[in-house]
Amino acid sequence: MSNKWICVLSDYIQATCYACSQIRSISELWLIVAPVYCRLKYGLGARDFTIYQLPRVALREWSQFLQNEPFKRILASQASAYGRQLADDKHAFYQHCWQHQLPTPQLTCLLCAPDSEQQQGTPQLHSADQLCQFLPDGQYFVKPQRGSHGQHAFAFVRHGDAVITAQGRSRIQSFAHQVFQRVRSGIPLIVQPQLVNHPSIRQLTGSPHLSTIRVVTAMEQGEIRAIGSFFRIINGNNQTDSFCHGSSGNLIAAVDVQEGRLLSTKCVCNKGWPVMAEISLHPRTGVTLQNFMLPRWQEVLATVFTAHKTMPFLKTIGWDVAVSADMVWVVEANWRYDIDALQVAHTKGFAAAIKPFYAIRT
């Protein structure tokens, strides 16, 4: 038996064990075969069955859960090439925001190869020596010009000749050379001042790093509405808020899109297999999560609605938004957002909400 089939068999064994753990009565004994039934009937695999907590969902609702990768292919088939390129390129998106007077974090500089073709308007640095000379003291956040899920993203502080990262203290010259090793490997990086969350959010997370809100909007006949929202909550010493199906250790909370209120918050019990658990208190701070009100919520909605009007070539967008003490920031626009994260947060399928905008078979 090949390694691939061994992994598939292992996944279904774990999903079956999870299903069995949810059996509470004789009428639920059928859950023993539910992971296989779910795959054959709805195309949802063992991990989907587990992370969506389908034993907790009425069987008649299972058809409403969308598969992430097929959904992304639908998005790709219907989004314009220009829209995809604009959202994927964080430097181009930053310039779009400034041209349309959308509140977005300033770009300090772009780290790229000398021969790369980049739009003008942002300082472009091509060597470690240039980075050492250009960058003033301060707190910064670095992420790839094109990237997702927090990969290759990190925060640092420069103070004179010293740089402090999650790995410790180093000399600026050594740090800059390490950073440009990534650039030379084909990963251009953008450097921004590190945003600071609203005081109520910092009190909730106990972290100096940024927790962001995802708001999914859709446009139909010129009208924009919010389809759904969730809040990524940093946990522990993480520097990014990516959920990554729970493997990051961060939390994910469903948000009432009308009020900006947290409905429920989840984490993964075991990073090796995505069994979700609902929690009521933040593990680090002990602050109550249930019914926590996200600050400046109506401003969040107004901001993403305004932003979507500047990108009418995309029918639906997943916006990453940060809330600071004095304003709302548009951090990123995602044309191929992960529908699975929205479904995980809400324990609910979103086919009915998405179907009016895309031809989806349910």
Image (cartoon, grey):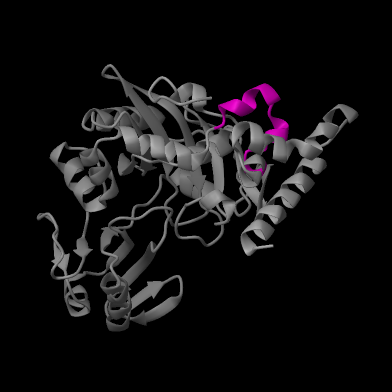
Q: Is residue 56 magenta?
A: yes
Above or below — where is 267 with respect to 130? above
User: In front: 20, or 155?
Assistant: 20
**Residue at x 28% of width, y 16% of height:** 221
Q: In which quarter of the image is residue 277?
A: top right
Magenta: main secondary structure: helix
Across and down, in percent, residue 125 comes to 17, 69
Classify residue 68 as left or right of residue 323.
Answer: right
Q: Quadrant of residue 175?
A: bottom left
**Residue at x 28% of width, y 80% of height:** 177
Q: How many marks?
A: 0
Classify residue 228 as left or right of residue 252.
Answer: left
Classify residue 260 as left or right of residue 319.
Answer: right
Q: Specify start and end residues of the magenta stretch as a single range.
A: 50-65
Q: Is residue 172 magenta?
A: no
Q: Quadrant of residue 303?
A: top left
Q: Quadrant of the N terminus?
A: bottom right
Above or below — where is 61 with respect to 288? above
Q: Outermost residue toward the left?
A: 120
Q: Outermost residue toward the right?
A: 26
User: In front: 24, or 69?
Assistant: 69
Above or below — where is 159 with respect to 104? below
Classify residue 161 as left or right of residue 29.
Answer: left
**Residue at x 69% of width, y 25% of height:** 59
Across and down, in percent, residue 195 comes to 34, 52
Across and down, in percent, residue 97 comes to 20, 41
Residue 292 visible to the viewer: no
Residue 205 visible to the viewer: yes
Across and down, in percent, residue 13 comes to 75, 51
